[in-house]
Image: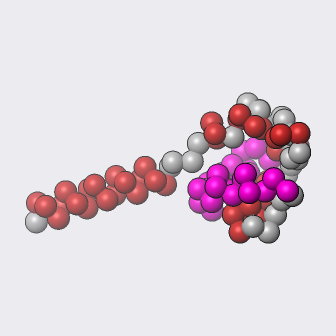
Amino acid sequence: MFKQSIITIATLGLLSVTASAFDTASCVGCHGANFEKAAMGKSKIVKDMTAEEITTALNGYKDGSYGGPMKMLMKAPATGMSEADIKAFADEHGKK
């Protein structure tokens, strides 16, 4: 029973770390601290996009249906985002 409890606690801890693992710090190198840059001179400026446009873009990067010639650069970061992460990001950074 004790061993099973430890495994359950460890699993829940791992899930909570995984669920909150997305951090925008990895985005600012290309998109700027305030998402004001066109990444690599090619992307749309995130701060000028609506929440709906951001959601469409991130989901499209995940499934390969969105983006131009540089879209593969965004596949890994977008794939690491859950639906909740995408919604929270779009709500926070989308144009009001």
The percent position of residue 37, horizontal first and vertical second, equals: 84, 35
Q: Is residue 43 in view?
A: yes
Between residue 40 and residue 35, name the one nearer to us: 40
The residue located at (40%, 57%) in the rendering is 15
Instruction: Count the marks.
Output: 0
Q: Is residue 20 found left or right of 3 in the rendered image?
A: right
Q: Is residue 12 found left or right of 80 in the rendered image?
A: left
The residue located at (73%, 51%) in the rendering is 73
Toward the top, the furthest residue is: 33
The C terminus lies in which quarter of the figure? top right
The percent position of residue 77, horizontal first and vertical second, equals: 64, 52
- Residue 49 part of the magenta segment: no
- Residue 79 part of the magenta segment: yes
Between residue 4 and residue 68, name the one nearer to us: 68
The N terminus lies in which quarter of the figure? bottom left
Between residue 76 and residue 95, name the one nearer to us: 76
Q: Is residue 38 found left or right of 16 in the rendered image?
A: right
Q: Main secondary structure of the magenta part?
A: helix
The percent position of residue 64, horizontal first and vertical second, equals: 75, 67
In which quarter of the view is residue 56 placed?
A: bottom right
Range shown magenta: 69-96
Q: Is residue 47 in view?
A: no
The percent position of residue 75, horizontal first and vertical second, equals: 69, 58
User: How is colour applied across the structure in the image?
Assistant: secondary structure
Q: Is residue 62 found left or right of 45 in the rendered image?
A: left
The residue located at (28%, 55%) in the rendering is 10
